[in-house]
Image: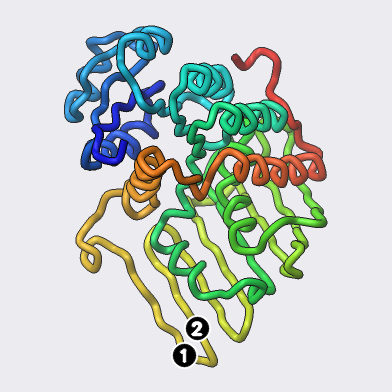
Amino acid sequence: MKDKTVRVGLVGAGSIAQVAELPALSAEPGVRIAGVVTTHSPIEVKKRLDRWPIDQYYSSVDEMIDKGHLDALFVLTPKQLHFPFVKLGLLSGLDIFCEKPLTTSLAESQELADLAEKTERVLMVGFNRRYAEVYQTAHAQFQAKDIRFCIAQKNRPGSEYRATLENSIHMVDLLRWFCGEAVDVVASTIASDPYYEEGTAAHIRFTSGAIGVLIAARCAGEWDERLDVYGNLTSVRVIAPDVVSISRLGETRTIEMRPRAMGWAQVSQTMGFGPEVSHFIDCIRTRNEPLTNGKDAVKTQALMDQILHNAGLPLSDKTNTI
């Protein structure tokens, strides 16, 4: 498998596919985009996607799996549709990349993680922030248990359906990556409709002794994502997508990963999508476990469920959303 061309199929061709996965896959050596499944008309889809080297368009996932000779499936649909496509792919012997969250139900996510283990397939979940240069640089500044406080913020204008689960789960995953596993969670929300909350805040204590704070406001004036980490006389601040400042004993070094400095401007690189896809392809070839594998994604979702439950937000979808 090491030298073999990896044939991938995409389920879903919306904004995340066009901004992140298609550019990253097109630039990845030894990868062929064998097919795309979409519910839109083929003519409309080809107009939007003709800049990328896609072999074939299919009207169903079953047809693409049957005819596409795939090695891996990218599930890039809305979150409430992930479960059946991931399960079908695993049962068909394919390695799976799934956008976050793995599913909208912790029980379903656990089922898929167990199925991936049983079928010996690679299952990776798209927590791309772990692969972004700014967050990797921040993470590298601390040894295990150095971190005492970690404040993660993801704020933006306007709510959306199950906003905390949809978007803030990135920051929950980062809190776990930096601080370890949670032992105590206190959370609150502001919401007139619990499915379209204005924001959520949480205070989390971790087994490492660290304290984490999550702030996820959906009533902000602009998109704002940042992470502040403190410990061992070190302060690190990430202002996503491209600035990280490191302070030790009064001396501060700021690294700007902007186009002029780094030579690239694509969001697929600054936000970690490109390195994320490269990691997945490497795991297909080497059979190594991904950093953001199915089992680890279940742990992030379990912590997210604790936050949602303690904030009084729903843990499952409305029955009429699919």
Q: Position of residue 291 (x, y in %)?
A: 51, 50
Q: Nearer the viewer, residue 165 or 57?
A: 57
Q: Is residue 168 above or below residue 93?
A: below
Which label was assigned to residue 251? 1
User: Could you say whether the residue bearing mark 2 is in a helix, strand or loop?
Assistant: strand
What residue is drawn where x is 59% and y is 33%?
A: 117
Q: In the figure, is residue 25 to the left or right of 238?
A: left
Q: Position of residue 277 (x, y in %)?
A: 36, 42
What residue is drawn where x is 27% and y is 49%?
A: 266
Q: Is residue 209 above or below residue 253?
A: above
Q: In the figure, is residue 106 to the left or right of 183?
A: left
Which label was assigned to residue 247? 2
What residue is drawn where x is 41% and y is 82%?
A: 253
Residues at marks 2 and 1, CA–CA distance in whole angstroms: 5 Å
The structure's colour scheme is rainbow
> What amino acid type is highlighted by mark number 1?
Glu
State the quadrant of the C terminus: top right
Instruction: Determine contact: label 2, label 1, CB under 8 Å.
Output: yes
- Residue 76 seen in this snapshot: no
What residue is drawn where x is 75% and y is 56%?
A: 182
The image quadrant that residue 163 belongs to is: top right
- Residue 302 seen in this snapshot: yes
User: Could you say whether the residue bearing mark 1 is in a helix, strand or loop?
Assistant: strand
Q: Residues within 10 Å of mark 2 (few under 14, many from 20)?
A: some
Q: Nearer the viewer, residue 196 or 71?
A: 71
> What amino acid type is highlighted by mark number 2?
Ser
